[in-house]
């Protein structure tokens, strides 16, 4: 009797093992993003040098890196997406491979900001209370934001039935493609200062106060927080040698800052005042220090950036801020002065260039 029962159970098991569970696979829409970096950065290869932040309503943000020269592809599902594209790899908000730039507010498209790293103050200038000195050596940053609705959704199809293949494969598919051109959100700038009797100067430094310390990446609008850019004023150029015997015809020239990177002035704070501090050590060791309101000279820069943001031509812009000061220095012999010091950005002594 027991042998008959065991034979029946064994036969039942063998029969049941002939039936296998069906297997289903997924097919999902893909979004293809291609960017043209040539207008803003002068390159067409951004492999491992660009990031796409992908925001979907009520979903956690995802992050993709460009693994090909100009494009990336990501899986999506039906819904509304905000896509923020920028150069550089953001491993975390505080860890990027962008020079002297970090991010905050990355959890939302509206709050996403890029910030200039703080740097040490110039020892020859007075640092005001709570003043933030922004790095002048940021990398040029570009961005573009688009909103896209995805209509297709993830689907399922039968891949194996009772252990047998032979059913049609439905692969992931590209539902839509985006072709984007990022815009610069930081700019090259340079300060040029005119002087009377410029050959009397030994060391000159300047500080520009009131420019933005960050930028909103989606709108490309500079923030309202204020930082200071400090720099040496060097590259002395004599524009008119003058006549030492004629006090009405003095020597004239200019000094300038190195080219530095900035997010520019805020565009929506019309009441903000902009100051430029200049500190000049003369060849006899005396000093000339002035703090001047340069708001009227910054206003054209604001208008230039506004026009850039409204343009459909995303090319980089270079800002020259000619701070025209009437700083008259006493005539001092070129043999006066002490030894030459060395500091950041080269020799501490003003370097003289020939007349052009």
Image (spheres, rainbow, N blue to C red):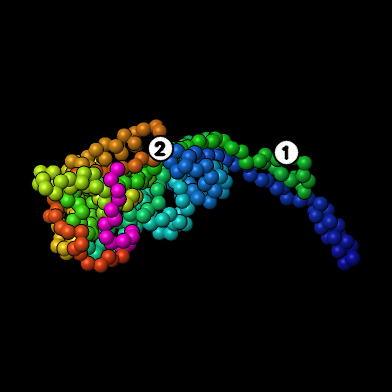
Near-viewer residue (155 or 324): 324
* Residue drawn at (13%, 43%) of the image: 249
Quadrant housing the C terminus: top left
User: Within the image, what quadrant is residue 57 found in?
Assistant: top left
* Residue drawn at (83%, 53%) of the image: 15
* Label located before the other in sequence (1 or 2): 1
Label 1 sits on a secondary structure element that is loop
* Residue drawn at (49%, 48%) of the image: 50
Query: Does residue 308 sit above or below 232 in this rendering?
Result: above
Q: Tell how many labels.
A: 2
Rounded to the nearest angstrom, the CA distance separating label 1 from label 2 is 48 Å
Residue 350 belongs to magenta span: yes
Kindly identify which residue carries mark 1: 168
Near-viewer residue (307 or 62): 307
Residue 98's spot in the image, x, y percent? Answer: 43, 54
Quadrant housing the N terminus: bottom right
Query: Does residue 132 sit above or below 241 in this rendering?
Result: below
Which of the two discs, 1 and 2, sits closer to the camera? 2
Relative to 176, 133 lies left or right: left
Relative to 347, 47 lies left or right: right
Label 2 sits on a secondary structure element that is loop
In magenta, the rendered stretch is: 343-356
Q: Is residue 17 visible in this depiction of the protein?
A: yes
Circle 2 crowding by C-alpha within 10 Å: few under 14, some 14–19, many from 20? some
Circle 1 crowding by C-alpha within 10 Å: few under 14, some 14–19, many from 20? few
Query: Does residue 142 sit above or below 120 in this rendering?
Result: above
Kindly identify which residue carries mark 2: 315
């Amino acid at each position: 009797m027991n042998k008959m029962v065991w034979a029946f159970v064994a036969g039942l098991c063998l029969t049941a093992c002939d039936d296998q569970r069906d297997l289903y696979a997924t097919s999902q829409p893909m979004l293809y993003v291609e960017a043209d970096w040539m207008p803003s950065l002068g390159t067409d290869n951004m492999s491992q040098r660009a990031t796409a932040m992908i925001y979907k309503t009520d979903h956690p943000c995802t992050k993709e890196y460009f693994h090909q020269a100009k494009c990336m592809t990501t899986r999506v599902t039906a819904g509304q997406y905000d896509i923020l594209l920028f150069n550089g790899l953001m491993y975390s908000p505080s860890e990027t491979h962008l020079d002297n730039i970090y991010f905050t507010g990355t959890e939302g498209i509206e709050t996403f900001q890029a910030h200039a790293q703080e740097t040490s103050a110039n020892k020859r200038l007075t640092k005001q209370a709570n003043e933030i000195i922004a790095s002048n050596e940021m990398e040029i940053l570009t961005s573009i934001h688009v909103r896209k609705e995805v209509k297709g959704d993830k689907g399922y199809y039968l891949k194996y039935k009772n252990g047998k293949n032979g059913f049609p494969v439905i692969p992931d598919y590209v539902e839509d493609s985006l072709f984007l051109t990022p815009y610069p959100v930081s700019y090259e700038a340079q300060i040029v200062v005119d002087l009377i009797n410029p050959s009397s100067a030994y060391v000159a430094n300047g500080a520009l106060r009131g420019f933005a310390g960050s930028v909103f990446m989606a709108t490309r609008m500079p923030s309202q927080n204020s930082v200071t850019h400090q720099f040496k004023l060097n590259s002395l150029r004599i524009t008119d040698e003058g006549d030492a015997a004629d006090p009405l015809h003095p020597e004239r020239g200019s000094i300038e800052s190195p080219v530095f990177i900035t997010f520019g002035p805020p565009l929506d704070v019309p009441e903000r005042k902009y100051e430029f501090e200049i500190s000049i050590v003369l060849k006899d060791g005396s000093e000339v220090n002035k703090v001047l309101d340069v708001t009227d000279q910054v206003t054209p820069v604001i208008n230039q950036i506004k026009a850039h943001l409204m343009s459909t031509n995303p090319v980089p812009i270079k800002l020259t801020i000619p701070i025209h000061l009437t700083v008259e220095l006493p005539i001092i012999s070129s043999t006066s002065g002490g030894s030459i010091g060395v500091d950041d950005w080269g020799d501490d002594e003003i370097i003289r260039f020939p007349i052009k």
